[in-house]
Image (spheres, grey):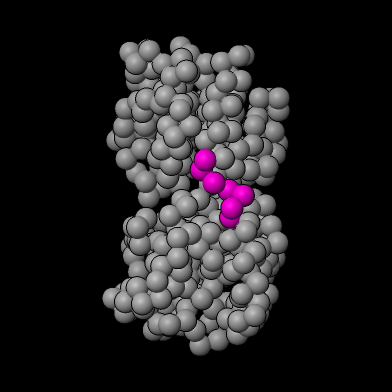
Amino acid sequence: MNVGLSGEFFGRPWTGTGQYSVRLVESLKKTGTAVTVLGGGSGNFLSKVHWEHIGVVLAARAAGVDLLHVPYLGPPIHSPRPLVVTVHDLIMLALPGYRGPLPYRLYIHLALAAARRAAVILADSEWTRRDLERYAALPPDRIEVIPLGHDERLAQPVPAAELVAYRTARGLPDRFVLYLGGFDARKNVPLLLRAAAAAGDWALVIAGDPPATRLPLYPDIRTPAAALGRRVIWLGRVTEEEKRHLYQSATVFCYPSRYEGFGLPVLEAMACGTPVVCANATSVAEVAGEACELVPPDDEARLAAALQRLMLDEERRAVLRERGRERARLFTWDRTARATAAAYARALGR
């Protein structure tokens, strides 16, 4: 079996789909599955659509693959080979504010029509599976849930002296709350900033680059950040290599997102042994299980109380560290790859 995987996001590992594409290919090859990455990033919107419906089809034919896997919601309307498509989430249908202008809505309509022709549709979580049935009317018998994995290198303990050197180089205090995961509206970063201001005198470290200008789906985070003053530390974009040091340096990781298709940062933090506070919403709770402090989404007071309690309670942090590591062991890329290879076999059988 030779699988052709669309490489549209392969060169963008900082995105969720990029991470999924890269890690899946690495892990599939370890299982003995032959994978050919087809093409690369296609540039602007029109060239992306051309690639998805024409370019990838021609590339699959030229490569002589047995099966085509598109690792995001962008499959071709006609595929020369049995088709597998991964759908990470349906934010654009579940949340009205994310539906976008008419060209984007037409693009999603076409993508869903193409997905209905797939032999197998992979969903990252039970929540996404339910959304696929609820919003897109995709055939339930062809939807399979295969959770993501975490990079097991993250779980390798960093020596204490090395963590001290890292914090010094990055200007980080000994104790801080960490946020990593984007800045669009569903991520609830303004809520986190307000809760952190009420939770105590600890620093809040924010990884990533918020937009320099106001955009429709990106709320103002500078105003609530002003209430914390110098307690907010902006790191900018961090590399995959840096994540291990950052997670393991944090006292608590907080992820208040109100909608996710999976919630990979929560899994990464647990794998690193970092205690987690997150919203009890959508797939995040599914990933977290009982290994995190879950608070109702949009409840600022409960979030502040959870952060304060966890920052002060070393015994509780120790419990969550152990539970988190144990929970994370259930989500590995090896397990994801083996389940995906089995889905490929079923797709070929259909």
Residue nearer the viewer, 293 or 45: 293
- 314 vs 205, left or right, is right
Displayed quadrant of residue 289: bottom right
Q: State the residue at coordinates (35%, 58%).
A: 241
Compared to residue 328, the image places residue 27 above or below, namely: above
Compared to residue 62, the image places residue 39 above or below, namely: below
- 84 vs 46, left or right, is right
Displayed quadrant of residue 36: top left
Q: What is the x, y in percent for residue 269? A: 52, 62
Residue nearer the viewer, 162 or 107: 162
Residue nearer the viewer, 112 or 179: 179
Quadrant containing the C terminus is: top right
Q: Does the magenta stretch include residue 331?
A: yes
Q: Does the magenta stretch include residue 14?
A: no
Q: State the residue at coordinates (70%, 61%).
A: 290
Q: What is the x, y in percent for residue 194? A: 55, 77
The magenta segment is 328-334
